[in-house]
Amino acid sequence: MLNKRNLVVPGLIVIGLLAAASLLASGAGGGSSSTDPEGVPWRTDVEAARAEAAETGRPLFLDFTADWCPPCREMERDTWPDAEVRDLLAGRFTPVKVDIDAQPAVAAAFGVQAIPTLVVVNPERAERRRTGYVGPEELADWLRDQAPSPALEAADASQAADAQG
């Protein structure tokens, strides 16, 4: 005689596995989509992002990361969802997330030795970088220094012209 209890547990396991497979197939498992739960409009194609940055005049912002990196996970939890960080990245940069395991040649080309590493490449191709965990307030300050607001730059230029004229 079959015991109903012996059928319930394996049945629940099968249902759970099917649900997980469905989520992974639909992309909800965190694939390479640029629509990130953090809200940052991450790109994953460095060359396409480089072209976009050149076209817009915005600096390229690269976040070198890996799934197995604890400080990277902390930044995903604490730093990237921060509204100010998200707005700065979306408004002043062309942000790219680079998984060093999936794109080791890109990491090597940028000389990445540790993660997380953040690299800003301005339109003149000069690089600035930070390595290690960076909290939201500290990163927001650093981002503002790397790419001042266009409105502030225009105001500074206007003040300089007034001072000379």
Image: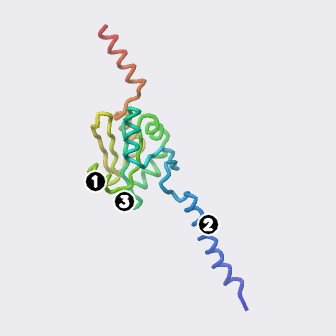
Residue identified by numbered label 1: 108
User: Does dot 2 land on a helix, a strand or a loop?
Assistant: helix
Q: Is residue 139 above or below residue 18?
A: above
Task: Return the disc, 2 or 3, that comes first in the chain's sequence.
Answer: 2
Residue 79 position in % (x across, y down): 44, 46
Locate the N terminus by quadrant: bottom right
Mark 3 burial class by Cα count in 10 Å: few <14, some 14-19, many 20+: some
Q: Tell me which residue sits at (30%, 55%) in the image.
A: 114
* Label 2 – label 3 distance at C-alpha: 27 Å
Farthest top residue in view: 165
What separation in Å lies between label 2 and label 1 (alpha carbons)? 38 Å
Taking the spot 64% from the left edge, 71% from the top edge, the residue there is 15
The amino acid type found where label 3 is placed reads Asp
Residue at image point 41% right, 33% down: 56
Q: Residue 101 carries which label?
A: 3
Amino acid type, label 2: Ala
Pinpoint residue 73: horizontal percent, then vertical percent.
43, 55
Q: Which mark is residue 19?
A: 2
Q: Quarter holding the C terminus?
A: top left
Pointer 2: residues within 10 angstroms few (<14), some, or many (20+)? few
**Splitting the image into 4 quarters, where does residue 55 fall?**
top left
Query: Left of 73 or right of it: where is 16?
Result: right
Marks 3/1: CA–CA distance: 11 Å
- Which amino acid, by three-letter code, is at mark 1? Ala
User: How is the rendered protein coloured?
Assistant: rainbow
**Answer yes or no: do the residues labelled 3 and 1 have beta carbons within 8 Å?**
no
